[in-house]
Image (cartoon, rainbow, N blue to C red):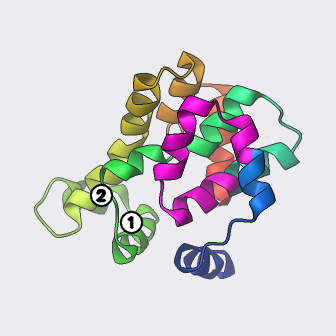
Amino acid sequence: MFYRVHQFWQAIHPIIREEELEWAITLLPPHSLPLFQAQPLPEQRHALDVALDLWNSGIRDSHLLIAALLHDCGKTRYPLKVWERIAIVLLQKGPRKIWNTLISSHFPISAPLRAAEAHPAWGAEMASEIGLDPHIVELIGEHHTPHSQEGYLLYLADNRH
């Protein structure tokens, strides 16, 4: 519960220290920096938390760290309001049947739910369009449904933050 309160606070008041941003810039290929910077500050904070989680656990694979910094870049195609993000988090904890019913309906939350499901594919598409390594593209695309060991590590780190 405290974790969700902390997460909510960071969404409202994200703080990114200069050294964290510099660290991300050293990892990201220059042509991918606009994808990172286009994300709202709460998403940048989250991306840094995920990447730093991996780094602090000893992971130095540049593809995985870059994917961590960009894994939610697809969310920029459909920016979510705070209440929508909260509803999505709550609905993800409930029965999948409720999610499926809402996503296929015309309730106010339906479009945000569809965006939540589509953002990994959107992010992979955006990463591919700028010419990122296909492995990074794959990791971004599978960060909610991992198909590889590295994808699973990204999935776990994402869920911790």
| Number of residues whose C-alpha sits closer than 10 Å to that of mark 1, classed few (under 14), some (14–19) or many (20 or more) | some
Residue 33: image tag: none
15 to the left or right of 74: right
Q: Which residues are magenta?
A: 24-48
> Residue 85: x and y, percent?
40, 68
Count the numbered circles shown.
2
Residue drawn at x 36%, y 77% is 83
Circle 1 residue = 88
Q: Quadrant of the C terminus?
A: bottom right
The numbered mark, 2 or 1, whose residue comes first in the sequence reads 1
Residue drawn at x 40%, y 51% is 75
Q: Amino acid at mark 1?
A: Ile
Q: Residue 143 lies in magenta, yes or no?
A: no
Q: Quadrant of the N terminus?
A: bottom right
* In the rendered image, the vertical position of residue 21 relative to residue 122, given as above or below: below
Residue drawn at x 75%, y 65% is 17
Q: CA distance from mark 2 to mark 1?
A: 7 Å
* In the rendered image, the vertical position of residue 41 relative to residue 83, given as above or below: above
Q: Amino acid at mark 2?
A: Leu
85 to the left or right of 68: left
- Predominant secondary structure, magenta span: helix
62 to the left or right of 67: right
Confirm or deny contact between disc 2 and disc 1 (CB under 8 A).
Answer: yes
> Residue 152: x and y, percent?
65, 36
Secondary structure beneath dot 2 equals helix
- For the question of whether residue 71 can be seen, the reply is no
